């Protein structure tokens, strides 16, 4: 019977696969040049480079290896890694993690000359790769090899800056090829240390085959390198970002936050993170909100999590912009309310401290402070923790703080007259407990239990193991229920967003991403889009023409911000999540187009989606003048209809139809994003993800028979018998475009399996 259902699964998969108008196609992926030396040209004799000794190779290649550093807040060198010259006019290849994020970058050549990086020429976060540009000429570039041709057991040489020892040389062999976190990597039998990252991996002919990236955690003399073939698309189609813009990536918006010296504060849409030592006593680092404070009484709240477990981070209030303020924060397993009267330990007063049972050792803790005219109330995870009448400070800013070597994350920062309580009510706790009470919870082990059961025969251990397995199953089921509830809430919000003709495309795309990323902060990403719009508006005149505004949009997104189509990891599901497209500035044609359309709308431009199969496009339809096709995947390239047709014919063997250039509705655009994610989940055989996407698709197309069939199959596979039967009933009573034979097969399978 299972085989019959599998046949039905294949039927539905084929339906989706053939419906190419809804799916992006892997054929669009850029292909790296296979080799620098072409041997298929009969007029050119292939030249095999001369093999060199390690000593000879090192003497030549060292001149092309550079030291890459980024500068910390104090102006001193903070990060250190390696890189190598790939073009004589100043292009340097390295790892993305070597250059930090939004920090000034410097390159030192073998002869001691130092250059500030002027442009981050290209990046690819999924492959941990970056190409930098410096203002230099006539540099000794290393030739790039073909990493696909490097053989296991072949000798290789690595050059880097391990532990700051510049241009150290080590030799070894290629021991294997590995897929690590979705990256195709070269496993090499030689040690990699801190500072090696970004350095070249060479064969004995002096050709680069990889970039040193990871050190093995299992053994000292084993490391990994990114394949150089993954670097080539970055050189062919860069996404250059000038340093003036690079320094703003993830930076705190100065119109919203004032960062005091010390600590490294970053903003990634709805969340804020901080690391690095603070500038104040005890490693104190502050980030204050610039918003105008409401009249007393008011409340301020945030959620915080941090590492290590004994770290300290939380809220500050009544801050003077310097060293004077109150702080409410977890610290070293306790919770504190402190008053800081100055810069040192002598002006630091701990007003209250307790080891509260409400403090979570892992995950997010909710902090809230209520400030009244004659008292301060502090809440931890909804419970009143402290109350004080201390009145040394009566006004000032509110914000965030962290201490010592703590690395902290914050989300949900709010200020208002009265903030909603986020703690679950006793009534809700009771209802949830009652709903899951059928799954037994064992009494915690104690010395008395151990003493009692230790006198029993050996079978007691087997019984306890069985109980432990039952508890594991219970925990897994509770987690599944929690995930289903979260998905149901997201789907309900998605349904509200797509009602009627006025579909919120931006919010809908973000909600699709939230189906797989429950902690996604929707409002934070909408604010991020609004910040981009604000930046563009600041550089165009109020009376600018539509074409001038479109030109400004293209220049800002593609030249200044570096948004680009994914070149080396096209099928990665991150490219379909609009939040990650905003974070990483790369994506698919359709997700980049959604962003483009939404920003254009906020600039007063009418840009629509064009549902060309295999490659989604955009089109500017001005009030006056000619319409213009735009390929957002190719950095805003303007296309003619003939260009679009040529692109389609390069990617597909299907016949061209002029209707491929018709505009597509926001509703259909969202469905196409879901179809792309659906396909990736099908390839990975992830039933829960497939079910979430199918639920969302049916919100958009409630009468789609094949999708009802697939929801029935997925419900059967995940033992959701009631839902599976409901789908069979729907299919039976509707003209579903699914054969009666397949419906009956599914019905028999459900009846058979559900009775076991």
Image: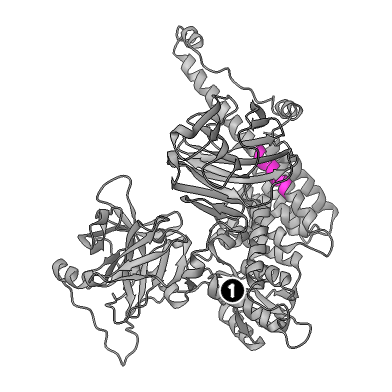
Asked whether, in this view, residue 281 is left or right of residue 61, the answer is right
Give the residue drawn at x 63%, y 39%: 480
- What SS does tag 1 mark? helix
Residue range of the region highlighted in magenta in the rendering: 481-490
Q: Nearer the viewer, residue 379 or 642?
A: 379
Work out whether residue 501 or residue 27 is closer to the camera in this orientation and state it: 501
Residue 656, compared with residue 349, is above or below; it is below
> Between residues 366 and 54, which one lies in front from this camera angle?
366
Q: Is 486 included in the stretch rendered in magenta?
A: yes
Crowd around label 1: few <14 · some 14–19 · many ≥20 (10 Å): some
**Residue 434, quarter of the rendered image:** top right
Q: Is residue 687 left or right of residue 294?
A: left
Residue 510 image offset from top left, x and y in percent? 67, 57
Q: Nearer the viewer, residue 572 or 729?
A: 572
Residue drawn at 84 percent across, 61 percent down: 500
Which residue: 61% across, 30% down?
474
Dot 1 corresponds to which residue?
A: 556
């Amino acid at each position: 019977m299972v085989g019959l259902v599998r046949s039905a699964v294949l039927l539905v998969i084929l339906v989706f696969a053939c419906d190419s108008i809804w799916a992006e196609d892997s054929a669009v992926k850029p292909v790296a040049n296979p080799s620098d030396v072409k041997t298929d040209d009969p007029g050119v004799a292939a030249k095999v480079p001369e093999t060199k000794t390690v000593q000879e190779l090192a003497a030549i290649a060292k001149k092309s290896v550079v030291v890459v550093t980024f500068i910390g807040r104090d102006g001193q060198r903070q990060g250190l890694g390696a890189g190598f010259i790939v073009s004589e006019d100043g292009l340097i290849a390295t790892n993305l993690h070597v250059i930090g994020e939004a920090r000034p970058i410097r390159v030192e050549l073998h002869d001691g000359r130092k250059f500030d990086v002027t442009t981050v020429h290209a990046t690819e976060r999924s492959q941990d790769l970056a190409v930098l540009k410096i203002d230099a000429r006539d540099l000794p570039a290393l030739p790039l090899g073909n990493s696909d041709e490097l053989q296991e057991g072949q000798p290789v040489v690595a050059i880097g800056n391990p532990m700051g020892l510049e241009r150290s040389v080590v030799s070894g062999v290629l021991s294997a090829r590995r897929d690590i976190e979705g990256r195709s990597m070269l496993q090499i039998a030689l040690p990699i240390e801190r500072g090696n990252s970004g350095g070249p991996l060479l064969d004995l002919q002096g050709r680069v085959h990889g970039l040193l990236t990871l050190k093995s955690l299992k053994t000292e003399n084993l490391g990994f390198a990114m394949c150089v073939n993954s670097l080539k698309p970055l050189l062919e189609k860069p996404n250059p970002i000038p340093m003036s813009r690079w320094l703003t990536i993830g930076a705190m918006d100065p119109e919203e936050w004032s960062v005091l010296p010390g600590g490294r504060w970053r903003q990634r849409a709805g969340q804020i993170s901080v690391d690095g030592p603070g500038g104040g006593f005890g490693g104190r680092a502050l980030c204050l909100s610039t918003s105008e404070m409401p009249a007393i009484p008011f409340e301020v709240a945030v959620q915080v999590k941090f590492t290590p477990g004994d770290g300290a981070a939380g809220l500050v209030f009544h801050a003077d912009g310097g060293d004077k303020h109150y702080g409410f924060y977890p610290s070293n397993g306790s919770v504190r309310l402190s008053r800081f009267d100055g810069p040192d330990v002598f002006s630091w007063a701990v007003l209250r401290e307790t080891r509260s049972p409400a403090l979570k050792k892992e995950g997010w803790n909710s902090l809230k402070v209520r400030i009244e005219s004659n008292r301060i109330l502090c809440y931890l995870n909804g419970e009143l923790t402290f109350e004080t009448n201390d009145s040394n400070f009566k006004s000032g800013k509110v914000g965030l703080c962290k201490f010592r070597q703590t690395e902290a994350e914050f989300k949900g920062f709010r200020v208002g007259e009265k903030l909603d309580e986020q703690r679950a009510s006793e009534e809700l706790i009771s209802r949830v407990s009652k709903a899951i009470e059928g799954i037994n919870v064992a009494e915690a082990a104690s010395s008395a239990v151990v003493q009692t059961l230790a006198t029993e025969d050996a079978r007691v251990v087997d019984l306890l193991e069985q109980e432990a397995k039952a508890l594991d199953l219970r925990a897994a089921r509770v987690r599944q229920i929690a995930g289903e509830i979260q998905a149901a809430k997201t789907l309900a919000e998605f349904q509200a967003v797509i009602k009627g003709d006025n579909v919120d495309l931006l919010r809908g795309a973000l909600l699709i991403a939230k189906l797989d990323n429950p902690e996604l902060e929707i409002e934070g990403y909408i604010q991020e889009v609004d910040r981009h719009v604000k930046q563009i508006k600041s550089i165009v005149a109020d009376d600018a023409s539509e074409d001038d505004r479109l030109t400004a949009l293209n220049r800002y997104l593609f030249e200044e911000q570096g948004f680009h189509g994914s070149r080396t990891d096209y099928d990665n599901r991150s490219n379909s999540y609009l939040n990650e497209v905003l974070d990483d500035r790369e994506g698919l044609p359709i997700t980049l187009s959604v962003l483009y359309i939404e920003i254009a709308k906020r600039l007063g431009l009418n840009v629509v989606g064009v549902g060309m199969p295999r490659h989604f496009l955009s089109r500017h339809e001005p009030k006056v003048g000619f319409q213009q096709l735009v390929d957002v995947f190719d950095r805003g390239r303007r296309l003619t209809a003939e260009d679009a047709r040529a692109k389609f014919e390069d990617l597909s063997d299907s016949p061209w139809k002029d209707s491929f250039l018709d505009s597509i509705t926001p509703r259909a655009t969202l469905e196409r994003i879901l179809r792309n994610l659906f396909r990736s989940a099908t390839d990975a055989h992830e039933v829960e993800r497939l079910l979430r996407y199918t639920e969302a698709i049916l919100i958009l197309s409630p009468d789609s028979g094949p999708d009802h069939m697939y929801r029935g199959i997925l419900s059967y596979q995940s033992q959701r018998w009631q839902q599976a039967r409901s789908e069979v009933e729907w299919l039976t009573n509707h003209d579903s475009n699914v054969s009666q034979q397949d419906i009956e097969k599914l019905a028999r399978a459900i009846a058979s399996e559900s009775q076991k």
